[in-house]
Image (tube, rainbow, N blue to C red):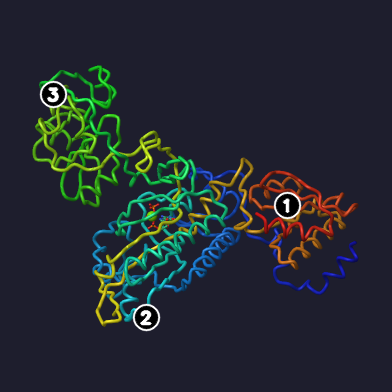
Amino acid sequence: MLRFLRNRLNNNLDRGDLKMKVSQLLLPTLREAPAEAEIISHQLLLRAGFIRKSAAGVYTLLPLGLKVIKKIEAIVREEMNREGAQEIIMPIIQPSELWQESGRWNVYGPELFRLEDRHGRVFCLGPTHEEIITDLIRNEVQSYRQLPLLLYQIQNKYRDERRPRFGLIRGREFIMKDLYSFDRDEAGLEVSYQKMFNAYRRIFERCGLYFRPVEADSGAIGGSDTHEFMVLAETGEALLVFCSQNDCGYAANVERAASPVKKRVDFEEPGLLEEVATPGKRTVEEVTLFLNVEPQKLIKTLLYETEAGYVAALVRGDRIINQVKLQKALGVLRCDLADAEVVERLSGARVGFAGPVGLKDLRLVADLEVMEMANAVSGANKDDAHFINVNPGRDFNPDQVADLRQVQAGDPCPICGSDLEEARGIEVGQVFKLGYKYSKALGANYLDEKGASIPICMGSYGIGVTRTMAASVEQNHDQNGIIWPVSIAPYQALVVPINTREDEQFILAEKVYELLLNAGVEAVLDDRQERAGVKFKDADLIGYPLRLIIGKQAVESSNIEVFQRKNGQTITVPLEQIVSFVKDYCRQI
Ligand code: ATP
Ligand code: MG
């Protein structure tokens, strides 16, 4: 058998990639994860030697890390190209003038990395590329004949995140695929949006992820319809609700999710507004226990500081205010809970006793549900006192009524009325219908058949490539390490000679390795002079989908033990079938 192998392989021994053996790889595995790594993907990517930190939120991709990234990028490219998109590369350094034109220079805030050149011209490092590409298109597209157009790039993005954390999940420098669509009108945009939506589904499926597209809030980028693609994981920063009723399919980020408000059914005779003593009772729990009422009888009053001044927001005692909804309702960019001093100054009472009745000089915004309450309890804007029998409309009139509350598990689905469920997710991609926001601001128009000048209808579509890699680890691991889906694994198969000092084992291992390479399998040979236990431990940590074990048995019987990382099973494959087995395995999964 060995002679047979030698004959087949001699012609190919000078292949460059044959040199890539574990002993030569820069693959620094660690026994322990550095303390700062809070979540499993961050810990494992560090421990398995895929990434190294350079500064907060800034990482080097080591050889195996880069291999995974290249695989994800290849999948993204294929699916973008399949939809007729064209790849370009735009500058990372962007002139501030374009951001002034779009109006985002002052809106984007401290997340934007700003810099000056030697002549004092101001630039930023691109966090996203709507401005640059709209500028390109206004110069290059004149006629309806040039539309529709889909352009994308895969490139580093820069965002000075307030809290860079979780390794590649929230970096300050990260790789993103961003695509922009240009259409004649909204009907065209709808087609582009659907194309991308479907491409995103295929991409994340091919990456082996368990995910869910959800309706989302459009945030600072602007526009109307938008969906986020969420990889479901406990450690996800996003909270989403979904309906598991057959055929319903409703799913939304809680920043966006609306839930129908139950109208008041049983009419309650309004009681007399009365101040009651609530000494030291500040929290919803303390007050409602003390007064012996349900939390849904309490009006919670929270004071916020925004760039447009202070506001008081009201929700039912058993609800949480969603800050993104509040921000949107108020039309502000910044919204932080006011600190205790401010609360005392504005309400006249210590924290815990603010209420809508008699609260002066503050914009008052109430959640929809608050307006359905009757004979409620609220703070009396006086230390150690609350009002009872508070009735909206009679005792106070908010300046604004809006949907502020965070939808929770058990709330009714806005489509079918069934109970919603909650999950956490990592946002790996987002698709936006931008509409005319940027084309109008920058004047990107085309001429139609009749010669009329019409603004181009745009969309933008992002995928976090580095974040996708981390999200995959978050979903695919066990106590021993990473379990890469074959489609994005750094290598498909590892060949392990058990005892490298046994010539026969080593020669057979090398031959199997070469056979695999010649058949186009991405294989790597663990040629290190280490104990088999050490090699297996590393292999588990690194997460190669298949491990081919070349020991005594392989040499004597030409049967090779193949360990499958995904299910932990070992099967025996005859040497003649090893290549086809590995190839089939990699195709199937
Ligand atoms: P997030 O809400 O998590 O901050 P975002 O909504 O601001 O993200 P987008 O502008 O939609 O992000 O960017 C497109 C994609 O880029 C996101 O879906 C995400 O996968 C990725 N991404 C965004 N910010 C980061 C980051 N700081 N680090 C790594 N990837 C990121
Ligand atoms: Mg997003």
Look at the image and tell me in which quarter the C terminus lies: bottom right
Circle 2 is placed at which residue position?
145
Tag 3 or tag 2, which sits nearer the N-term?
2
**Element under disc 3:** loop
Mark 1, mark 2: which one is toward the viewer?
Answer: 2
User: Mark 2 packing: few (<14 Cα in 10 Å), some, or many (20+)?
Assistant: few
Q: Is residue 520 left or right of residue 367?
A: right
Tag 2 or tag 1, which sits nearer the N-term?
2
**275 or 80, which is in the foreground?**
80
- Residue at point 30% right, 36% down? 320
Q: Which mark is residue 245?
A: none
Q: Is residue 52 left or right of residue 450?
A: right
User: Mark 3 packing: few (<14 Cα in 10 Å), some, or many (20+)?
Assistant: few
Circle 1 is placed at which residue position?
547
**Element under disc 2:** helix
Mark 3, mark 1: which one is toward the viewer?
Answer: 3
* Image spot of residue 293 (x, y percent): 25, 20
**Element under disc 1:** strand
Q: Given the image, on which type of amino acid does mark 3 rest?
A: Pro
